[in-house]
Structures are given as structure tokens and as C-alpha cells.
Image (spheres, rainbow, N blue to C red):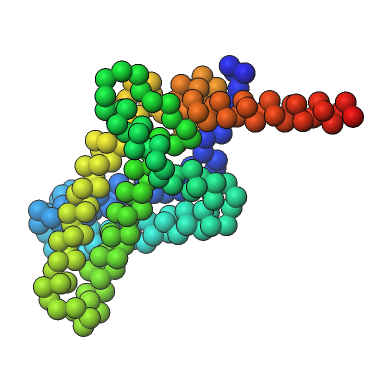
Amino acid sequence: MSDEVFVRMNRSERGQHGLLALTFVILALSGLPSLAGEAGLIRLVFGRGGADAVRGLVHRGAALAFIAAFAWHFLYTLLTERGRRNFRDKLPRGRDAKDARAFLRPGPRPDFDRYSFIQKFEYWSLLAGSTVMIVTGFFMWASALSLRLFPLWLHQVLVVIHGYEAALAVVSIAVWHMYTAHLAPGVFPMSRVWLDGRLTAEELRRLHPLEYRRILEERERRARKKSMMEGE
């Protein structure tokens, strides 16, 4: 059992994560400089006049790929049994609040199931933040439509929300997600799940003990059932 490997993320899930991560980085590099009125390295290559145009094309192209990743995840969750199970496992529960309180107190950390309260918080924050970015980004892209539907001040509010949500997302990923997923004790220097999708039995027992126990209990139930059927 100690040498057994468990599939934490299958190929489709790793593909969704990879596309999301790639487009997020491109969006950040091409979008955040506009908050300061600069276009970074793009301006050095293409000059002041062409920099904003190139940055805009890169940003909009990455935005379309980001939306594709979002749609991929939605369809995967809706149409596959594993996707639906993952979604159910990420739903907030009363135990998550207890785990959060126990996590903040001195002493042993709580036992986590397939997804900890931290991972659930990250997931739902990602969905909410992505929705905000897609909606506000659409009206920034279709500015003529936005100005027909909304007063100028509301359009400007959408622009401000888009920018600050982007800055918040970058800080959250760079600090919070990178630490919890890759730099925290027990996973440092990097979790390889996003690359090969696998956890060893020792890693699963240490990081997700409730899930590990449930797997063992299910195996024991199946073994007893099989034994009873063979004895009949």
C-alpha cells in the first residue's frame, strides 16, 4: 500500500489547470502594466505607438483562451461523473468552518478530506473572480455597447473593478496559492500533482487523511461483500 499511487488530477483536469495557469500569466503580464500607463517590455520592442496595440491583441487573445478554459471546466463538471463528484466535494460544509478555526489555533492541524477548506476557498474565489473579470472585460472590449447600455460613470466603474480585481488575483496567486500548493511544509519545493496528477499513498495519508481512510474502508467493504458472495 505504501508504494501505491493515487490519481489526484486526470489528464483533462491537468489540461484545464495548465490552460488556466498559462492564460492567467499572459493576462497579468499584458494587462497589469496598463494600470500604470506602461506596456513594459512590449514598448521596448515595438515602440511607444505599437506597444499598446500589441499588448491589447495579446491580452484579448489570452482572454479568449481563458474563457475557453472556463468553459472547458464548466462542461467537464456538468457532463462527467468525476467532474460532478469533484464539484460536490468542493461544496462548503459545516466542517470547513470548524477546520478553519482549528487551523488557526495552536496544536495539531485538522484532518482534511479530498479538499481542505483552503482549497475550497481558492476554488470558489477563482470562480467568482473569473466571472467578474469576464463580465467587466467584455464591456471594456465592447465599449460602444457598454456606453449605449450604461452611463459613462458606470462604464468607468467597470474598468476600475476589472483592474483592481486583476491586481487582487495576481497577489492571491503569487502569495496565497503558491505558498499553500507548493511552498508550505510537506509539499516544498513543489507539488508535482499539476504535472503528473499523482499522489503517493504516504502523501495522500498525510495531506488528505479522511479521504485516505474512506478509500481503505470502501476497499474493506468491497472485500467483505465479495467474500460473502463467494461463500454463498
- Quarter of the picture containing the N terminus is top right
Residue at x 22% of width, y 69% of height: 140
Residue 127 is situated, as x and y percent measured from the top left of the image, at 36, 53
Residue at x 22% of width, y 52% of height = 166
The image shows residue 56 at horizontal and vertical percentages of 24, 62
Where 158 sits versus 215, above or below?
A: below
Could you say which is closer to the camera, residue 15 or residue 179?
179
Locate residue 49: give its quadrant: bottom left
| Left or right of residue 115: residue 188 | left
- Quarter where residue 119 is shown: top left
Where's the C terminus, which quadrant? top right
Name the residue at 81% across, 26% down.
Answer: 227
The answer to whether residue 45 is seen in the rendering is no
Viewer-proximal residue among 181 and 50:
181
How many numbered discs sit on the rendered protein? 0
Q: Position of residue 139 (x, y in %)?
A: 25, 71
Residue at the image point whose x is 60% and y is 22% from the top: 4
Q: Seen in the image, is 112 located left or right of residue 171? A: right
**Is residue 116 visible to us here?**
yes
Is 13 on the left or on the right of 187, as rendered?
right
* Whole-percent x, y for residue 155 in the image: 17, 72
Residue 89 vertical position relative to residue 210 in the rendered view, above or below? below
Which one is nearer the viewer's eye here, 172 or 108? 108
